[in-house]
């Protein structure tokens, strides 16, 4: 066996320490990378879970809004219908009043008064919901008037309305039914 000198013996542990240090640094770096990988995996799982929950919440909100939309459309005329009930009551009262034992002239007068009040009540209810009658004083407009006849008239200028045969109605600014009118030549 050869004898190792003291110097060789002293340098040998230093080399082993350097190798051990390099190994421990590499192990520490590998462990750090593995820890970071684990953290990133946990974050990915957490984000996937959050995404799934948000997506489910969005779907639930979308379905609820669809149901609410259908309900709103289905019951959209409820206010209008409630406003028509008193008009129906007034008409029924008119029918009941015909059974009274009043004289024909008195009965006719009461019916005329009842019909007039019912028309006013009905008109008010329609206007409350944006339905208005086309004014008889408006100039002729082919968008809201339908000229069914033209006559010669010295009192009214050519193209102006002489007489309204049937009233027209508008919902806000959109015609529901054109007014049938007679215009001057």
Image (cartoon, helix red, strand yellow):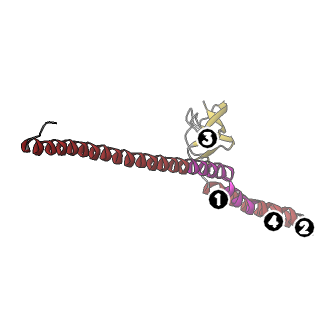
Tell me where residue 172 appears, x and y as whole percent.
Answer: 57, 47
The label shown at residue 103 is 2
Alpha carbon distance from label 2 to label 3: 43 Å
Q: Is residue 149 magenta?
A: no
Q: Earlier in the sequence, mark 2 or mark 3?
A: 2
Q: Residue at x 55, y 40 (%)?
A: 139
Tell me where residue 34 appears, x and y as whole percent.
Answer: 35, 45
Alpha carbon distance from label 1 to label 3: 18 Å
Tell me where residue 118 appears, x and y as whole percent.
Answer: 73, 60
Q: What segment is highlighted magenta in the picture?
A: 59-87
Binning the other alpha carbons within 10 Å of mark 2 as few (below 14), some (14 to 19) or many (20 upward) gives: few
| Quadrant of image for the N terminus | top left
Label 2–label 3 contact, CB within 8 A: no
Nearer the viewer's eye, disc 2 or disc 1?
1
Give the answer, above or below, for where 121 lies relative to 13. Answer: below
Give left or right: position of 96 versus 67.
Answer: right
The label shown at residue 142 is none
Alpha carbon distance from label 2 to label 1: 31 Å
Q: Earlier in the sequence, mark 2 or mark 4?
A: 2
Which element is circle 3 on?
strand
Which element is circle 4 on?
helix
Q: Which residue is mark 1?
A: 124
Label 2–label 4 contact, CB within 8 A: no
């Amino acid at each position: 066996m050869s004898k190792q000198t003291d110097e060789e013996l002293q340098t040998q542990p230093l080399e082993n320490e350097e190798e051990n240090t390099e190994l421990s640094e590499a192990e520490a770096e590998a462990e750090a990378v593995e820890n970071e990988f684990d953290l990133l995996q946990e974050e990915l799982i957490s984000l996937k879970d959050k995404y799934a929950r948000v997506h489910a919440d969005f779907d639930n909100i979308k379905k609820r809004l669809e149901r609410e939309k259908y309900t709103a459309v289905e019951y959209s005329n409820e206010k209008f219908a409630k406003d028509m009930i008193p008009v129906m009551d007034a008409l029924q009262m008119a029918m009941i009043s015909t059974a009274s034992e009043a004289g024909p002239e008195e009965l006719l007068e009461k019916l005329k008064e009842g019909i007039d009040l019912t028309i006013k009540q009905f008109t008010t209810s329609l206007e409350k919901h944006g339905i208005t009658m086309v004014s008889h004083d408006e100039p002729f407009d082919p968008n809201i008037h339908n000229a069914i006849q033209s006559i010669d008239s010295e009192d009214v200028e050519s193209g102006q309305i002489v007489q309204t045969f049937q009233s027209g109605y508008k919902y806000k600014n959109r015609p529901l039914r054109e007014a049938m009118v007679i215009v001057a030549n």
